[in-house]
Image (cartoon, rainbow, N blue to C red):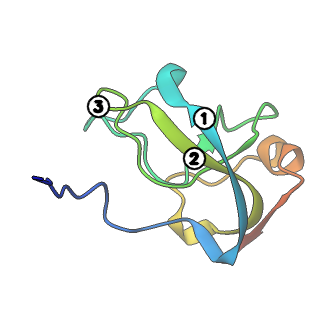
């Protein structure tokens, strides 16, 4: 058997400890950045009152739009690409933000 080993990211996650819950999420409707990546820590689906969680690791929608969203746990604010709005923080009742 032949196996190919590919790196799927840099191993940077926004969770601050090992107590968290992720759910699968189809990121097809999320707009990636200029590099074609939806970065770790993006508030999903939007940084507003519709927020359901925080993207667990980078997603490259062109390769595979499936990602994992943290819906419960502790998130390190310093690892987010954008600070959560007050509306997003209020909507994310299962998430505690720490840092900064």
- Asked if one can make out residue 9 in the rendered structure from this viewpoint, the answer is yes
Question: Which residue is rendered at x = 38% and y = 68% of the image?
Answer: 11
Q: Position of residue 85 (x, y in %)?
A: 73, 46
Question: Which residue is rendered at x = 66% and y = 78% of the image?
Answer: 18
Tell me: 2 left or right of 85.
Answer: left
Q: Position of residue 67 (x, y in %)?
A: 51, 41
Q: Which mark is residue 63?
A: 3
* Spatial separation of the CA atoms under disc 1 and disc 3: 15 Å
* The furthest residue to the top: 29
Question: Which residue is rendered at x = 63% and y = 44% of the image?
Answer: 43
* Spatial separation of the CA atoms under disc 2 and disc 1: 6 Å
- In the image, residue 26 sits, relative to residue 58, either above or below, namely above
Q: Earlier in the sequence, mark 2 or mark 1?
A: 1
| Local crowd size for mark 1, using a 10 Å CA cut-off: few (<14), some (14–19), many (≥20) | some
Question: Which residue is rendered at x = 62% and y = 55% of the image?
Answer: 83
| Local crowd size for mark 3, using a 10 Å CA cut-off: few (<14), some (14–19), many (≥20) | few
**Foreground: 67 or 78?**
67
Q: What residue is disc 1 on?
A: 25
Q: Position of residue 45 (x, y in %)?
A: 65, 32
* Spatial separation of the CA atoms under disc 2 and disc 3: 15 Å
Cβ–Cβ below 8 Å for labels 2 and 1?
Answer: yes
Q: What residue is disc 2 on?
A: 68
- In the image, residue 46 sits, relative to residue 7, either above or below, namely above
**Foreground: 26 or 12?**
26
Mark 1 element type? strand
Quadrant the C terminus occupies: bottom right
**Foreground: 19 or 39?**
19
* The furthest residue to the front: 1
């Amino acid at each position: 058997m032949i196996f190919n080993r590919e790196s799927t990211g840099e191993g940077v996650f926004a969770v601050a400890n090992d107590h968290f819950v992720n759910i699968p999420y189809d990121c097809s409707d999320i707009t990636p950045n200029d590099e074609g990546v939806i970065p770790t820590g993006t508030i999903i689906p939007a940084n507003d009152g519709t927020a359901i969680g925080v993207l667990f690791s980078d997603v490259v929608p062109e390769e595979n739009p499936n990602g994992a969203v943290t819906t419960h746990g502790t998130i390190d604010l310093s690892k987010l690409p954008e600070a959560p709005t007050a509306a997003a923080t209020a909507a994310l009742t299962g998430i505690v933000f720490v840092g900064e």
